[in-house]
Amino acid sequence: MTSSNLPHLLSKFSSAMGFFDNLASLLGLRQIKSTDLVILVIGPSGVGKSSFINKFAGQNILKVGHGLETTTRKFSHVLCPSRTEQRIVLVDTPPFPLSMQDEVRIKKWMRKSLGKNMIFHSILYLHRITDNRLNEPPKVHFHTFETLAGGEFHSRVALVTTMWDTLRNQEVGKGREKEIMTGDWEELTRKGSLVLRHENSTDSAAEIIEQVISLGRVSSYGTRS
Ligand SMILES: Nc1nc2c(ncn2[C@@H]2O[C@H](COP(=O)(O)OP(=O)(O)OP(=O)(O)O)[C@@H](O)[C@H]2O)c(=O)[nH]1
Ligand SMILES: [Mg+2]
């Protein structure tokens, strides 16, 4: 191959990718079904939301940040393979706190995808264990959880801590985790929220999703199945 052929080949390659992209949409492979388990991944900038989804999907689908700037500016969903027939959809979001506009966009997408009676299966709130406190006061978290997941959100929210591998002393992390559970998020943990550690691997992400799924699906009427 000569270098003069390269632009031609690249354009052929990208039009072929476009074709497969369109085909996937036509076949409904990107569309959400009412039986899908939709899990929202939220948290402040740089906590590892996109990385978590990539780890779970086992592929680098979403762009991950390497600097101080926010990487994910729009929300997007990733259909992930799962061990059961039920599909898992992880939704990546812009940094927390979400703007009202973001919340409205996410809710509209949800209504369009799953119909007006369906809501998220659960919400993962990611937090860097290297930070000695949550970035926002609890009322900001609770307000977003209620807006996105309805009044009975407590048992459908999991606090997932990241960056354990960068902690010099694991005991410090465990202490912070306990502080959150008995302080800011006492009400959540008392009412059933899970507190889970992400070890930055595919296995760890899969374990977290498995634990969250075991909580069961809740419809907007609050009944579990
Ligand atoms: N060491 C370590 N690095 C991590 C971990 N999780 C994420 N990272 C790194 O943290 C950086 C930010 O990760 P992202 O996944 O882009 O974070 P994000 O929350 O999606 O960030 P925004 O899209 O900007 O809100 C990247 O360099 C990741 O490789 C972790 O558990 N351990
Ligand atoms: Mg991101």
Image: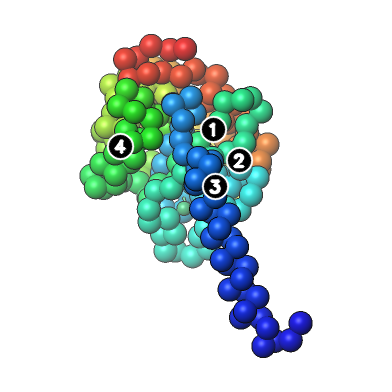
- Amino acid type, residue under disc 3 in the picture: Ala
Disc 4 secondary structure class: helix
The residue wearing badge 4 is 107
Badge 1 vs badge 2, beta-carbon distance below 8 Å? yes
* Residue 182 image point, x, y percent: 41, 25
Q: Which class describes the residues within 10 Å of circle 2: few (<14), some (14-19), or many (20+)?
A: many
**Quadrant containing the N terminus in the rendered view:** bottom right
* Residue 95 image point, x, y percent: 37, 50
Q: Does the beta carbon of the residue at mark 1 sit less than 8 Å from ligand 1?
A: no
The residue wearing badge 3 is 24
Looking at the image, is 60 positioned above or below residue 196? below
- Amino acid type, residue under disc 4 in the picture: Lys
Q: Which class describes the residues within 10 Å of circle 1: few (<14), some (14-19), or many (20+)?
A: many
Rounded to the nearest angstrom, the CA distance separating label 4 from label 1 is 18 Å
Q: Earlier in the sequence, mark 3 or mark 1?
A: 3
- Amino acid type, residue under disc 2 in the picture: Phe
Rounded to the nearest angstrom, the CA distance separating label 3 from label 1 is 17 Å
On residue 194, the disc is none
Rounded to the nearest angstrom, the CA distance separating label 1 from label 2 is 10 Å
Residue sticking out furthest to the right: 1
The residue wearing badge 2 is 56
- Based on the displayed image, in which of its 4 quarters is residue 8 positioned? bottom right
The residue wearing badge 1 is 88
Rounded to the nearest angstrom, the CA distance separating label 2 from label 4 is 24 Å
Of residues 113 and 95, the one nearer the viewer is 113
